[in-house]
Image (cartoon, helix red, strand yellow):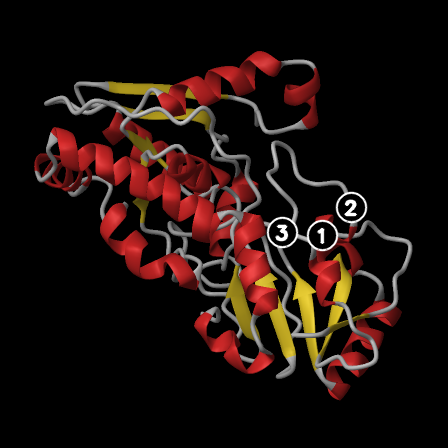
Amino acid sequence: MRLEVTATIDRPVVDVFGGTPGLFAGEIPRISDFFDSSNSDSWICPHDLFDVWGDEDYINYLGRMADQKNLILFNRGDFAKHFCHPNVISLQTSIEPGFRCLKHRTIVVPYNVRIMTPFTLRVYTPNPVISFMGYVPKLTFGRYFRSFWPLPPKPIKRNGALIRRQGLKKVSTFPQSKVTPRSEYSGTYKAHGEKTDLRVSYEDSLINSDFVFCPRGDGNMSQRFYEAISAGRTPIVPDSDMLFPQLAKDYLSDSIIQVDSLSTELHDSVMRFWRKLTEDSYAEHQRRLEKLFKEDLSYAQYMTKLFNSKIEELNKFTV
């Protein structure tokens, strides 16, 4: 596709326009290669929708641009905004349960995470190692309120703190489990600049595991999911109506573990998956996960494939 950039205002620009990349981010794609203001078929906004949402004049301006032709919006916050217009294409890292907007096209894109290096193969053993290291927030009134409002039918699937706590109780019953809950979010600049040991211990935990418990956070997806795959580790994903990037959907359905009930299915699902493997097939499984990340699920690769497509071909990306 050929892109024309909308007007820029005094707000942060997204990473692909030279903005600050996320913490522990990977390669940034070069979408400037697709800019062509003289022959464009789509507008693209250089700001994340979350950052401009309160600017009524700019939002109205984007609406006028969408009236002319397709408008691509970066909408990658934990709680996506809904710019409901038939010509809008919303690039989101997740879709909140019950909040899918059917009035614009939505494309789930991966989080931009740094691949876990060096790549090391785990050896198959009778009892796999299952890990989780990370932030487990308190169950505050605000979190309960947010999970009920405005769609009461989704109170559990929309409560990341509750899903994490339920899942970790079950994960802890595995013979070879390594669960390290933290009371603070360790993916912050403070953790990077002042407490680098938090990130080092997190990466060590992930690399030295066979399965990684990957529940949702505040958003209905987690960076941990992509980091685990990049290391060749198998994610365990409790059901919270997650929607995965379309290009990898078919392979992911056979290569990760999704459980509907944390209380009754987790142990059986993991061991059923594990007992089908052998030493050779487990090594191949890890290599395929790493390859899947490098070729399809890394942010740079996915976005490059997206913008290399013709505007008429976007249905293969759209959820």
Nearest the eye: 308 or 213: 308
Who is closer to the viewer here, 260 or 222? Answer: 222
Q: Which residue is mark 1?
A: 16
Q: Which residue is mark 3?
A: 77
In the displayed structure, 13 sits above or below 127; it is below
Q: For the residue marked with disc 2, what is the amino acid?
A: Gly
What is the CA distance from the residue labelled 2 to the residue labelled 1?
Answer: 7 Å
| Residue 45, position as x, y percentages in the image | 76, 65
Q: Write down the quadrant of residue 21 in the picture.
A: top right
Are there few (<14), some (14-19), or many (20+) residues within 10 Å of tag 2? few
**Label 1 amino acid?**
Val
Give the residue type that dot 3 points to.
Gly
Badge 2 vs badge 1, beta-carbon distance below 8 Å: yes
**Residue at image point 44% right, 50% down:** 295
- The image quadrant that residue 121 belongs to is top left
Residue 245 % position (x, y): 44, 59
Residue at the (47%, 35%) spot, across then down: 139
> Whole-percent x and y of residue 43?
75, 74
Q: Quadrant of the C terminus?
A: bottom left
Up/down of 104 relative to 26, above or below: below
Element type where label 3 sits in the image: loop
Quadrant in which residue 309 is drawn: bottom right
Q: Report, in whole angstroms, how far the alpha carbon at label 2 lies from the one at label 3.
A: 15 Å
Where does label 2 land, which residue? 19
Q: For mark 1, does the 10 Å Cα neighbourhood hold few (<14), some (14 to 19), or many (20 or more) residues?
A: some
